[in-house]
């Protein structure tokens, strides 16, 4: 406690002396700036704005650089910065070394965030004085998350939103995870590349980790498993958020050896993982969790386990689409005699090719395959160079997210893309005009549109017969109908009506099933089921609605309209009747003796009326045939259109809405895949 208090008092005295020197320097700068007029005033205004801990070099780069465009205060600010630089050399404040888990630890202290780092400091002190890690200065523009990748992520987000009510949560879980991880990675540092070292037991992961870091960070040994928890090592500052995302605590965060070889790996964050085939289940969980979050993976294999089925079937084959962010390193080549290393490396390439992993050869994008010996250092320089170039490109995060998008789109392909049915062009979705017309015809048959048209035609003919028929023949027909022992009303009609209703309902159900199957043809299973359910919901009250239409839109109530020639026909029929009446009365007067005997004229009048009446009726029937047919067709058309409109509103419109939603999600799926050829 006494030592800590002494160090604190010493630090406070240094700060008081520093403030005193700064005031003297600022006063001198103000006096020099007064000779320059407004420049001196600007210099005095800029001087007190500097924070108490800023060095002279920083102050010169700040105010002078901000106004170095020829403004009047440039000389005053430059003089102030120069005087400050001459009077006060750059100083580095010494902080007491604190344990990451001891009292007084600050979460904001970057040194504490990396843990104690005792091993790194011990080796650095043995070789040369430790230097402060150099701040990373980006030399390239930020990673392009915007552009095609942003459009694909937005399309996937829209796709998930449109599909939540049609697909189960398990189907969309992977897509949601990709979106969450992409957003989380995007919010973190773009100038760092997170690379994990993974491998089987005894493959030499920790040895390679230490060789790349240049310092003994991860424990190595014969005891298995050696690495029990993931360890993080960063070559630059600002990676705390990335390591927090990976769940690596502060006590397992280290720094590499700072030296000439560390420059080429600036921006690299290296993670040493436990064995993926460890007998401890918690170790395998660490591996699976972190492999889903890192930007790239270095798979370390040895000559004995490079063909391990567990490695290829569980990890390499499912991650074949991530070849551009994959390194496969054949370690321990020092154990292979002669040309055996080349033979094993060629066989490893063959296995990777069978797994579907593209190999980055001849400048083509793909996985990097190298042969090294982490123990002797053979091939470490080549791996370090490849990692340095890979890190400086700053494209690993984008490539990883793009590969995750591709994998998620491939998993979702069965629920958004299906093969075209027979006789239909691939990619065509929806109901054809033939299917719609067939559905309308089936509904018209179910509602009896043709029968209603025939009934309307017969009604028109009956009305024409009443208006233009011979009254004596109509009277005779009525008499015959009354003498008939079996009238039309005696015919039992109850059972046929019930059978007709049952048949009509079956026809409606069959029509709905047929049009639903036609609309669902060529759709993926979930969307085809949604189309069928929409059609079934609309068909629940369809038979009853069609029955009402048969009454309201069938044969109109009242008499059919009369054509223009009906009055002439009625007048002619009345004239024929009058001739018969006049001729009959004339003959009766001759018989009684009232009229003069003359049989010729009354008989001719009666014959003209008797023959003319049926002739007028027959001519009226011929003339009424065309209007009656048109009247029946019009009645059938009205009922057919009414039935088709009812079926369209209840069945076709909901089906069309489901098809439109599917077309929309399929368009979003095409955007997710990033290619128009995604639908085949």
Image (cartoon, rainbow, N blue to C red):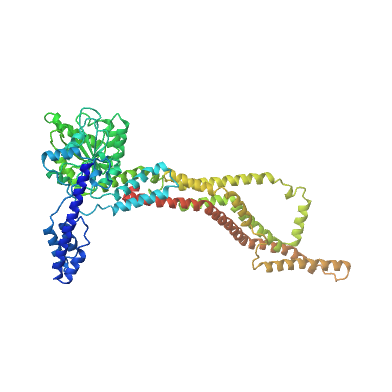
What residue is at 76 percent from the left and 60 percent from the top?
Answer: 472
Task: Report the front residue among 287 and 155.
Answer: 287
Quick check: 675 left or right of 77? Answer: right
What residue is at 40 percent from the left and 42 percent from the top?
Answer: 171
Quadrant of residue 103 within the rendered picture: top left
Task: Report the front residue among 397 and 309.
Answer: 397
Quick check: 277 left or right of 546? Answer: left
Quadrant of residue 215 within the rendered picture: top left
Quadrant of residue 639 within the rendered picture: bottom right
Image height of 342 relative to 540, above or below: above
What residue is at 29 percent from the left and 54 percent from the top?
Answer: 146
Image location (x, y in percent) of residue 559? 68, 62
Quick check: 435 left or right of 156? Answer: right
Image height of 471 relative to 673, above or below: below
Image location (x, y in percent) of residue 4? 22, 43
Instruction: Work out which quarter of the rendered image holds the N terminus and state it.
Output: top left
Q: Can residue 97 be seen in this view?
A: no
Q: Can residue 328 be seen in this view?
A: yes
* Furthest-right residue in this view: 593
Image location (x, y in percent) of residue 193? 23, 46
Task: Report the front residue among 650 and 480.
Answer: 650
Task: Report the front residue among 378 and 161.
Answer: 378
What residue is at 44 percent from the left and 53 percent from the top?
Answer: 660
Quick check: 604 left or right of 668? Answer: right
């Amino acid at each position: 406690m006494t030592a800590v208090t002494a160090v604190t008092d010493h630090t406070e005295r240094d700060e008081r002396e520093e403030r005193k020197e700064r005031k003297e320097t600022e006063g001198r700068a103000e006096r020099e700036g007064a000779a320059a007029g407004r420049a001196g005033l600007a210099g005095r205004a800029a001087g007190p704005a500097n924070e108490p801990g800023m060095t002279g070099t920083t102050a010169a780069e700040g105010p002078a650089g901000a106004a170095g465009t020829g403004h009047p205060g440039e000389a005053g600010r430059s003089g102030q910065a120069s005087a400050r630089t001459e009077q006060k050399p750059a100083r580095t404040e010494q902080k007491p070394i604190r344990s990451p888990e001891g009292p007084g630890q600050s979460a904001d202290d970057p040194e504490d965030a990396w843990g104690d780092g005792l091993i790194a400091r011990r080796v650095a002190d043995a070789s040369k004085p430790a230097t402060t890690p150099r701040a990373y200065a980006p030399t390239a523009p930020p990673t392009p998350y915007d552009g095609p990748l942003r459009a694909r992520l937005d399309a996937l987000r829209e796709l998930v939103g449109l599909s939540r009510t049609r697909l189960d949560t398990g189907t969309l879980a992977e897509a949601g995870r990709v979106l969450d991880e992409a957003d989380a990675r995007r919010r973190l540092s773009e100038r760092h590349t997170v690379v994990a070292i993974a491998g089987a037991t005894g493959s030499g992961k920790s040895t390679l980790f230490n060789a790349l870091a240049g310092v003994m960070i991860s424990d190595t040994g014969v005891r298995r498993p050696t690495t029990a928890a993931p360890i993080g090592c960063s070559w630059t500052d600002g990676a705390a958020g990335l390591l927090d995302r990976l769940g690596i605590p502060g006590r397992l965060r280290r720094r590499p050896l700072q030296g000439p070889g560390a420059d080429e790996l600036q921006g690299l964050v290296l993670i040493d993982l436990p064995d993926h085939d460890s007998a401890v289940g918690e170790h395998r969980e660490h591996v699976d969790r972190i492999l889903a979050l890192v930007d790239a993976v270095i798979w370390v294999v040895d000559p004995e386990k490079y063909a391990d089925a567990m490695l290829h079937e569980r990890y390499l084959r499912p991650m074949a689409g991530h070849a551009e962010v994959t390194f496969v390193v054949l370690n321990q080549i020092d154990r292979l005699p002669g040309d055996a290393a080349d033979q094993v490396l060629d066989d490893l390439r063959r296995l990777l090719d069978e797994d579907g992993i593209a190999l980055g050869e001849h400048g083509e994008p793909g996985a990097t395959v190298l042969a090294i010996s982490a123990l002797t250092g053979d091939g470490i320089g080549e791996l370090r160079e490849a990692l340095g170039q890979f890190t400086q490109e700053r494209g690993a995060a984008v490539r990883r997210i793009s590969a995750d998008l591709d994998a998620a789109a491939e998993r979702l392909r069965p629920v958004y893309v299906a093969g075209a049915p027979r006789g239909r062009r691939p990619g065509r979705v929806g109901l054809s005009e033939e299917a719609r017309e067939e559905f309308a015809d089936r509904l018209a048959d179910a509602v009896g549109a043709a029968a209603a048209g025939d009934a309307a035609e017969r009604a028109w003919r009956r009305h024409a017969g009443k208006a233009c028929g011979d009254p004596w023949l109509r009277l005779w027909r009525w008499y015959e109908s009354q003498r008939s022992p079996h009238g039309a009303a005696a015919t039992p009609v109850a059972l046929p009506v019930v059978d007709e209703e049952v048949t009509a309902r079956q026809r409606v159900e069959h029509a709905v099933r047929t049009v639903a199957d036609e609309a669902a043809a060529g759709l993926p299973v979930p969307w085809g089921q949604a189309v069928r359910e929409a059609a079934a919901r609309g068909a629940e009250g369809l038979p009853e609605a069609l029955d009402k239409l048969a009454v309201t839109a069938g044969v109109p109530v009242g008499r059919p309209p009369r054509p223009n020639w009906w009055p002439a026909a009625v007048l002619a029929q009345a004239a024929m009747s009058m001739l018969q009446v006049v001729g009959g009365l004339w003959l009766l007067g001759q018989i009684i003796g009232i009229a003069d005997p003359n049989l010729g004229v009354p008989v001719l009048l009666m014959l003209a009326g008797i023959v003319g009446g049926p002739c007028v009726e027959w001519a009226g029937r011929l003339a009424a045939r065309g209007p009656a047919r048109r009247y029946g067709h019009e009645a059938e058309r009205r009922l057919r259109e009414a039935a088709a409109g009812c079926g369209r509103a209840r069945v076709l419109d909901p089906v069309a809405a489901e098809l439109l939603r599917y077309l929309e999600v399929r368009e979003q799926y095409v955007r997710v895949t990033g290619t128009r050829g995604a639908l085949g």
